Image (cartoon, rainbow, N blue to C red):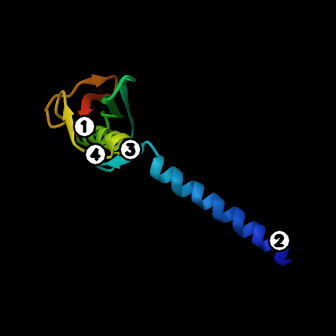
Amino acid sequence: MRSLILPLVACLGLAACDGVRSFFTSERVTFDGVAFRGQAKAVDKSDRRHFIASAGPASRSMAGAREAVRYQGTRYCILNFGISDIAWEISPETEVLPMDGDKVVLKGRCLE
C-alpha cells in the first residue's frame, strides 16, 4: 500500500506545480472586475526593446482594458529586460486609445 501512496503523492505534487506555473504565466488578467486577454511582443526581432501590447475586450470596460494593456507592456519589459520603465508612443492615460477591433493596442519601448 505504501508503494502506491508515494508515487501518487509525487504525481499530485507535480500536477500542482504545473497549475501554479500556468497561473503565473497566464495571459489573462482581471481589471475593473473583467477578465482581459492580452499580449505584448517585439515589433522587430533586431531591437526587442520596442514592443506592441494589446488587451481586450475593451467593450466590457475601457478603464480595465487600459490597465490590462499597461500590465502587458510592463510584464513584457520585466520578463525580457528586468525593468518596468516604459516610453509609450501614446500614453495609456490618453482619453482616446488606438483600437484594433475590440482590443486596445499600444506601442512602447522598454527603458534602461
Residue receiving disc 4: 83
- Look at discs 4 and 2 and give the one toward the viewer: 4
Residue type (three-letter) at the residue carrying disc 1: Met
Q: Position of residue 82 (x, y in %)?
A: 33, 46
Residue receiving disc 1: 62
Instruction: Say which element carries label 1.
Output: helix
Instruction: Say which element carries label 3.
Output: helix
> Split into 4 quadrants, where in the image is the N terminus?
bottom right
Residue receiving disc 2: 4
Residue receiving disc 3: 79
Q: Which mark is residue 40?
A: none
Tell me whether the residue at label 4 lies in contact with that at label 2, contact meaning CB atoms closer than 8 angstroms.
no
Of label 2 and label 1, which has the lower sequence position? 2
Residue at 20% across, 32% down: 88
Residue at 76% across, 72% down: 6
Residue type (three-letter) at the residue carrying disc 3: Leu
Instruction: Say which element carries label 2.
Output: helix
Tell me whether the residue at label 3 lies in contact with that at label 1, contact meaning CB atoms closer than 8 angstroms.
no
- Look at discs 3 and 2 and give the one toward the viewer: 3
Local crowd size for mark 1, using a 10 Å CA cut-off: few (<14), some (14–19), many (≥20): many
**In-front residue for pair 76/23:** 76
